[in-house]
C-alpha cells in the first residue's frame, strides 16, 4: 500500500504572512516552517492514538501537502513514525529512546534505594549508583556512610570514565568509549591511568573479575570499587560502587567489599528483571 506521504521530500518553506500588523516582527520563512513542524510534532505526542496526516493538517490549519512534507522531515529524524499500513503517525524511535531512559532511571532509583541503604549500613561507607552519560559517569543516587570521614556528595556530579571505578565498569561492558590517545586521558591524580595500553589492561581485569577498582585515581586519598548492574536484556544499565578514604579502603578491605558488592549488584540486577544464564524476565 502506498504511504500517505513521501519520505525524503523537501520540507516546504512557506512565505511569511503578507498582512502582518504594523510594528509586529514577521517570522522568516524558515522559522515559520520550524514552528509548523514543531506544532505537528506536539500534536502527535499529545494524541492518545496514532493520528492521520489529514487530521493533523486540519487541526493545524495547514494544507495536507504542507503537513506531509513537514512530517516527512520529522520521520527522517526519527521523531515520528508511521503506524502500520494505514499511515497514521505516532511518536518515533528518537522520542521513545528519551522517554525510555527517563523511565528507566526513575524506576532504577526507586528499586535501588533499599539496596544502597542496606549496603551503606553493612559497609559503613558511601554507596553510589551511577549511569553512563555523554560526558562521563552521572551519579543518580547516594547513601552516605556512618563515618565522619567520608567521600562527599556525588549526586549531580559527572566524572570521567577512565578515572573512576563506576566509569571503568561502563568501559569494560561497552557502555562507554575511552578517549583515543594518551593526551585525551586527563590526569586527575598521580595514579590516574593515562596510558591507553594500561587502561585496556585494567578494563580487561574488570571483565575477568566482575568488578572495577580505582585508588588515588580521581583524587589522592580516595578509593572506590564498583560492580555492574544489568537490566532485563542483560545490558549493563548502571554501576553500584562503594567509596571511601584509602585509610579504610585498604587492598584487603577492597577485596572484601568487592565480594559483597558483586553479590548485591547481582540482586539488584535480578530485581530489574535480569536472569543470569537464562532468559530475561518479562
Image (cartoon, helix red, strand yellow):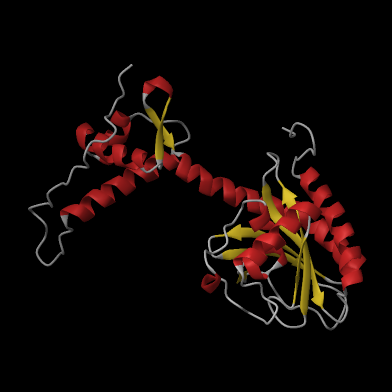
| Residue 64 locus on image (x, y percent) | 23, 32
| Residue 274 locus on image (x, y percent) | 75, 40
| Residue 281 locus on image (x, y percent) | 75, 34
> Which of the 4 image quadrants contains residue 8?
top left
Looking at the image, residue 23 lies above or below residue 147: above
| Residue 74 locus on image (x, y percent) | 34, 42
Return the residue found at the far front: 197
Determine the residue positioned at 70% across, 44% down.
Answer: 231
Looking at the image, residue 154 lies above or below residue 3: below
> Which of the 4 image quadrants contains residue 113?
bottom right
228 horizontally vs 14: left or right: right
Return the residue found at the far top: 1
Looking at the image, residue 254 lies above or below residue 174: below
Q: Can residue 132 be seen in this snapshot?
A: yes
Determine the residue positioned at 27% across, 51% down.
Answer: 34
Quadrant of the image containing the C terminus: top right
Residue 107 or residue 191, whichever sits in front? 191
Looking at the image, residue 116 lies above or below residue 281: below
Amino acid at each position: 500500500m502506498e504511504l500517505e506521504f513521501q519520505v525524503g521530500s523537501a520540507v516546504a518553506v512557506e512565505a511569511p504572512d503578507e498582512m502582518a500588523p504594523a510594528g509586529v516582527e514577521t517570522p522568516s520563512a524558515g522559522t515559520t516552517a520550524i514552528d509548523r513542524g514543531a506544532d505537528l510534532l506536539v500534536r502527535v505526542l499529545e494524541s492518545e492514538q496514532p493520528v492521520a496526516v489529514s487530521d493533523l493538517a486540519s487541526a493545524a490549519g495547514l494544507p495536507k501537502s504542507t503537513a506531509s512534507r513537514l512530517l516527512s522531515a520529522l520521520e527522517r529524524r526519527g521523531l515520528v513514525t508511521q503506524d502500520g499500513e494505514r499511515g497514521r503517525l505516532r511518536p518515533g524511535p528518537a522520542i521513545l529512546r528519551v522517554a525510555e531512559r527517563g523511565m528507566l532511571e526513575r524506576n532504577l532509583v526507586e528499586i535501588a534505594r533499599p539496596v544502597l541503604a542496606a549496603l551503606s549500613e553493612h559497609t559503613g561507607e558511601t554507596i553510589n549508583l551511577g549511569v553512563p552519560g555523554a560526558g562521563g559517569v552521572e551519579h543518580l543516587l547516594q547513601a552516605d556512610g556512618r563515618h565522619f570521614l567520608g567521600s562527599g556528595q556525588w549526586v549531580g556530579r559527572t566524572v570521567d570514565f577512565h578515572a573512576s571505578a563506576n566509569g571503568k565498569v561502563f568501559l569494560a561492558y561497552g557502555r562507554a568509549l575511552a578517549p583515543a590517545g594518551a593526551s585525551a586521558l586527563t590526569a586527575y591524580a598521580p595514579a590516574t591511568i593515562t596510558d591507553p595500553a594500561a587502561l585496556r589492561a585494567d578494563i580487561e581485569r574488570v571483565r575477568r573479575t566482575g568488578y572495577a577498582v580505582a585508588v588515588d585515581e580521581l583524587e589522592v586519598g580516595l578509593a572506590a570499587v564498583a560492580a555492574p548492574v544489568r537490566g532485563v536484556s542483560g545490558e549493563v544499565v548502571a554501576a553500584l560502587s562503594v567509596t571511601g578514604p584509602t585509610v579504610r579502603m585498604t587492598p584487603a578491605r577492597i577485596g572484601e567489599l568487592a565480594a559483597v558488592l558483586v553479590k548485591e549488584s547481582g540482586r539488584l540486577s535480578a530485581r530489574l528483571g535480569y536472569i543470569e544464564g537464562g532468559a530475561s524476565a518479562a
